[in-house]
Image (cartoon, helix red, strand yellow):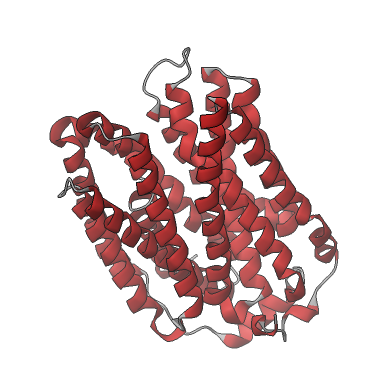
Amino acid sequence: MTKHSFLFLIGGILSLIIAMGIGRFAYTPILPIMQNDLSFSDAIAGYLATSNYAGYLLGAILAGVIPLRQHRTLSLRLSLTISILTTACMGLSHSYLIWYVLRFLSGIASAFVFVLASSIVLDKLAARDQTNWSGFFYGGVGLGIFFTGLIIPGLNQSFKWEGAWIGLAVASVIFAFLVWIWLKDAPLIRGRKIKQEISTQVPPVKWLPWLIAAYGLEGLGYIVTGTFIVSIAEKTSNFSGDATFVWMVVGLAAVPSCITWSSLAKKWGYVKSLVFAMTIQSVGIAMPVFWMSQTGLVISALLFGATFMGITTLATTLARQMSPSNSSRIIGHLTAIYAVGQMIGPTIAGILSSFTRDYNAALIGAASVVLIGACLLLKGIQFEKKPNIENAPMNYKKL
């Protein structure tokens, strides 16, 4: 990889740290601090989370519908700016209504950044026959999660929760400056791109609905652990230390996961790797039900962190290879169905946990949903056993 390509990839990683690791997921470790200071209810906390998921859904839909192919760099920069501003403004207000609006706008911006940065980076990597580097790109989400878990305690100690939001926004500005310099869209080399796509063994475009359905079930199931794992740790009597440690474990495990799963996909195939990753994740989600201890929670966090971004890496890379001429649109559709699952999952889990007074039913349900998604993908494995020339001339618009 050349120096230019390396800096381009770093720019993509930083864009995910800003919009996903900070703009989207920083809410999880800051939330308990805000609640301790302001004493607002779990219901309000849930509404704020739902507002962000709703914004993410709308952003994913818009990113998949609006023709952004010719303006991806400009759109990405605008989305990053909105993400940074909404992060900073969270620390400048104590109004619930304003928070709802900010988290909603942050969700929209996060979705746009994810879709645009993914399509820009994956297109360039494919043009250079370097799709195996996509794992490093998606590792940016895990780096962002780990970064927030690492820096927020210090910011809170010095500047309270308001300073935590503002401090993260300042860090985002620094990262965004580098993104501006290094991450720029460029015309693809069509000849090389077509050659690469024809030689890739992936399912035909007509199989795409199965991938979309499975990815939606992944969004529905994974978000239960993603939302409640810290709360589960806090309510575990024999869990010693700060419960946010579990969240740091998730982020740390997520960093190398994308690289690992991309490497496995090169050897096994993307569909087979997806099935395996989702099966492992379902085990991790269900683990606290059968092993409610500090060790069980840490292992659950490791399995969850090691798979949730790896699955995203595999699904988006596979989808782009199946329909390379419509990467922004197809990734937008995947992100939208994923966002729908994220909105439904916490609501169902909350109702179940309120009724049963524990998280066991919610976790078993989430694990089952993810496992069902893995089963939906099984038939796709057959297409990876032989070269698939069908993909090259086909277009996603034919669906």
Residue 312 is left or right of residue 89, and the answer is: right
- At x 43% / y 67%, what residue is drawn? 59
Q: Residue furthest front?
A: 355
Q: Is residue 282 above or below residue 60?
A: above
Question: Could one spot residue 175 in this view of the protein?
Answer: no
Q: Is residue 346 above or below residue 265?
A: above
Question: Could one spot residue 91 in this view of the protein?
Answer: yes
- Percent from the top left, x then y, of residue 141? 44, 51
- Percent from the top left, x then y, of residue 179? 32, 65
Residue 217 is left or right of residue 60, and the answer is: right
Residue 228 is left or right of residue 310, and the answer is: left
- Residue 13: image quadrant is bottom left
Residue 151 is left or right of residue 114, and the answer is: left
- At x 65% / y 76%, what residue is drawn? 323
- Percent from the top left, x then y, of residue 299? 57, 27
- At x 21% / y 38%, what residue is drawn? 161
